[in-house]
Image: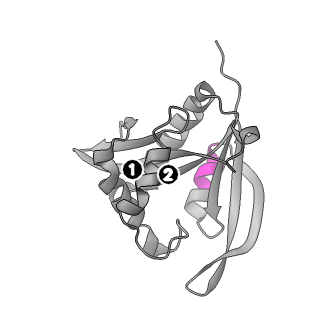
Amino acid sequence: MNWAYRLATIADLPAIVAIYNSTVASRMVTADTEPVSVASRQAWFDAHQRPDRPLWVVEQAGEIVGWLSFSSFYGRPAYQGTAEVSIYLAESVRGQGLGRFLLCAAMNFAPGIGLHSLLGFVFGHNTPSIQLFEKMGFSTWGHLPRVAVLDEIERDLVILGLRLKPETA
């Protein structure tokens, strides 16, 4: 598949939220246990209008089928060079290489916005996402046992990290 991403606009927010909400029931991807509203994601969207913390979308046949966000890690100045990447895909495109495409694009883009490290926060039982990050060179930087409870089941959080090569001229 020949994928391309673009910066998200406010008109994309309902589709972004719909993709996010499509993952809630699986208990594999998000710690939200109920769908979220578009209004509740407005501040999050606004935080991703900075050049160094963008939000990307991918369209297929005129519909948004995936998105990636760069989010600040820990919110303090000393961590400015580190960002969390989040990838969410519509069910119709999962397993087709879009996650790999987006993660690769993020890794190539990140040094240009001053990032030296990328993080992924993934539930320990989300094997497909862990495998994706590991295939792209990420390794486990942290393991938080039983920190989430989903449907009365305690779940681990794995922090996957990658130190990026400096941008070359």
Direction from residue 90 to residue 54 in the image, left or right: right
- Up-down: is 58 above or below 43? above
- Up-down: is 19 above or below 67? below
**Residue 159 lies in what quarter of the image?**
bottom right
Name the residue rendered at 57%, 58% in the picture.
129
Q: Quadrant of the N terminus?
A: top left
Position of residue 37 measured from the top left corner of the image (x, y, whole percent): 36, 66
Direction from residue 159 to residue 45 in the image, left or right: left
Identify residue type, mark 1.
Gly
Position of residue 153 measured from the top left corner of the image (x, y, whole percent): 62, 84
Magenta residues: mostly which secondary structure? helix
Q: Earlier in the sequence, mark 2 or mark 1?
A: 1
The region drawn magenta spans 131-136
Residue 32 highlighted magenta (yes or no): no
Direction from residue 167 to residue 98 in the image, left or right: left
Name the residue rendered at 44%, 46% in the picture.
46
Tell me the SS state at disc 1.
strand
Identify residue type, mark 2.
Ile
> Which residue is farthest top?
169
- Up-down: is 94 above or below 76? below
Direction from residue 51 to residue 107 in the image, left or right: right
Position of residue 87 measured from the top left corner of the image (x, y, whole percent): 50, 51
Residue at the spot of label 1: 66
What is the CA distance from the residue labelled 2 to the residue labelled 1? 7 Å
- Along the line of sight, the residue nearer the viewer: 78 or 106: 78
Tell me the SS state at disc 2.
strand
Residue at the spot of label 2: 87
Q: Is residue 142 visible?
A: yes
Q: Could you tell me how many numbered marks the image carries?
A: 2
For the residues bearing labels 2 and 1, Cβ distance under 8 angstroms: yes
Position of residue 141 measured from the top left corner of the image (x, y, whole percent): 77, 53
